[in-house]
Each structure stands twice: as structure tokens, then as C-alpha cells.
Amino acid sequence: MHDPAMFPDADADACARRAALAILAECDPATKAAQARALFDAACARPSCIDPRATLVEPDDLPGRPDRPELVAPSSLKRRSMQSDAGRAVLLHALAHIEFNAINLALDAVWRFPSMPLDFYLDWLKVAAEEAHHFSLLSARLAEFGHAYGDFPAHDGLWEMAQRTRGDVLARMALVPRTLEARGLDASPPIRKRLAQAGDHASAAILDVILRDEIGHVLIGNRWFRFLCDADHLDPYSTYERLAPQYHAPKLRGPFNFEARRDAGFDEAELRALAGLDGAQ
């Protein structure tokens, strides 16, 4: 539903990109999620509120986030069995943390990078809204286990990549949606299977929603990566091979979800290269 308060007047201060920056700075997760969804609805109802030319000043302390969870090194996070409620609560919390960061990443793309086509901003506002929906689903499910977001430690890998690519929209498109988020396409089916085997069909159903939407998000990343490559007459394959080590992207490791990656816009040459890493397609 369109929130008329999202854009109270018609001047430049009502720009949706400025609103995205304000939401990115919001610390309360539930408020951030609700506002991200409202902003997408408002921008769809009034696309003229998006000003691609606006150059905004970055405030201190982005992104806004709560005092908890404690952020720790990935190596210090222990895996737990999904056969127990406690283990599944830890998993749901980890997924909620990923989705919270994904809201921030999408909003950051909206405000940070000027002079892109209007559809670029609408695409990433849509991603922010869908990530907000995922976060809300996971938070509600986590509450059924007697926990809330912030109860367990987490790591900050997604936002660290956002920081590294802050000055290069091409690198951002290459390495956040096409690399980090695409890893979620590979990880979702085995996690869903283990949840179902543990009898947790409610949590497994949330994974179905997330995978469906994340295919679309990675597709958006592929679309804009190739758009930017075409605009600068760059070969997308060699460009990715250059950017990945330059920005310290994680090494790609199988098993890969080839069907989901194909649906998300990876072409057959890219899938063959992944198959070589995986050993089989």
C-alpha cells in the first residue's frame, strides 16, 4: 500500500533515493523492514520520486543496526544439529541476519550510485522490500522458538563486501548479487532438506519463499552487471575474473544449484565453468 507520508512534498528532499538512505540508517530491524516495503510501494505508485541525478552525502555509521547481535569472525560460529529446537533457532537466526544485511545492501545500491536508469532503482527497491519480507518471516518463526533477532552472534561478511565495493557500481553488481547472494541459491536446497527431515516444515516453507525470490534478485544483479559491461564495452567473463580477486571475493565452491543459477541469468559458459569447479553438472 502506498504510504503518502513517505514523500510529504514534491521537492528534491522527497527523492526515493534520499528515503532509502534514511531507511538504511534506521537501527530498529522491524522498523527498517516495514519502511523498506512501504518505500517500494510508494516508488511504484510515483516513479517520478526517484531522482537518478541526486548525489547524496554519506552519513557516519552506516548501516543502522541494533546493538545486538554481537558481530564475530565467521570461524567462531559453531554449527549445530537441526534435529534440536536449539539448533534450528540458531539457523533461523543466521538466516535472519543474512536477510537483514540484504535489506541494507539493496538500499545501499539505491542511494549510493547515481546516474543509473530508473529501472535500476526500482529493481533494488523491490529487492529491499522482498528481503524485508524474508526477514519478517524468519523473525516471526524465530519468535515461535522463543528467540529474537540479536540473541545469537553473527558475522558481517555481506556488509564488508558492500564496503569494499562502495566506489564501483560494476564491482557491486558483480560481487554482491552474482557472487554472495548466488551462494544462497546453492545453499538453500540442502538446508531446506535437512529442515524437512527434522520435521520442521514451517521453516522449510520459508526457505521455499526465499529461494524463489532470491533467484529474481540474482537475475537483477546479472542484468545490471551485463548492462554496465555493455555500456563500457567490457567482456563480462574477463571483467568478473578481474574483479573477484581485486575485491577479495570468496572462492566459488560447489555443489552448485545449476537449475536455480540458470533461472537467475547465468549463461551456459558460466555454468560450464562452475561445473569444472564442481566436478560434474
Image (cartoon, helix red, strand yellow):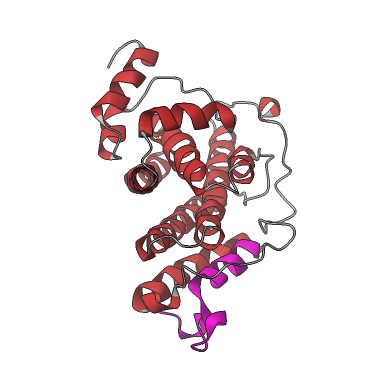
- In the image, 224 versus 79, the foreground residue is 224
Q: In this view, does 150 lie to the left or right of 234?
A: right
Q: Is residue 117 magenta?
A: no
Looking at the rendered image, the quarter that the N terminus falls into is: bottom left
- Outermost residue on the front side: it is 233
Q: State the image coordinates of residue 72 (x, y, percent, origin top left).
A: 73, 36
Q: Eyeballing the image, is 220 above or below 274?
A: below
Q: Eyeballing the image, is 135 above or below 83?
A: below
Q: Eyeballing the image, is 263 above or below 118?
A: above
Q: In which quarter of the image is residue 225?
A: top left
Q: Is residue 2 magenta?
A: yes
Which residue corresponds to the image point at 55% horizontal and 56% vertical from the top-left? 108
Q: Is any atom of residue 151 visible in this view?
A: yes
Part of the protein shown in magenta: 1-25
Q: Is any atom of residue 187 visible in this view?
A: no
Which residue corresponds to the image point at 56% horizontal and 59% vertical from the top-left? 112
Q: Is residue 91 left or right of residue 120?
A: right
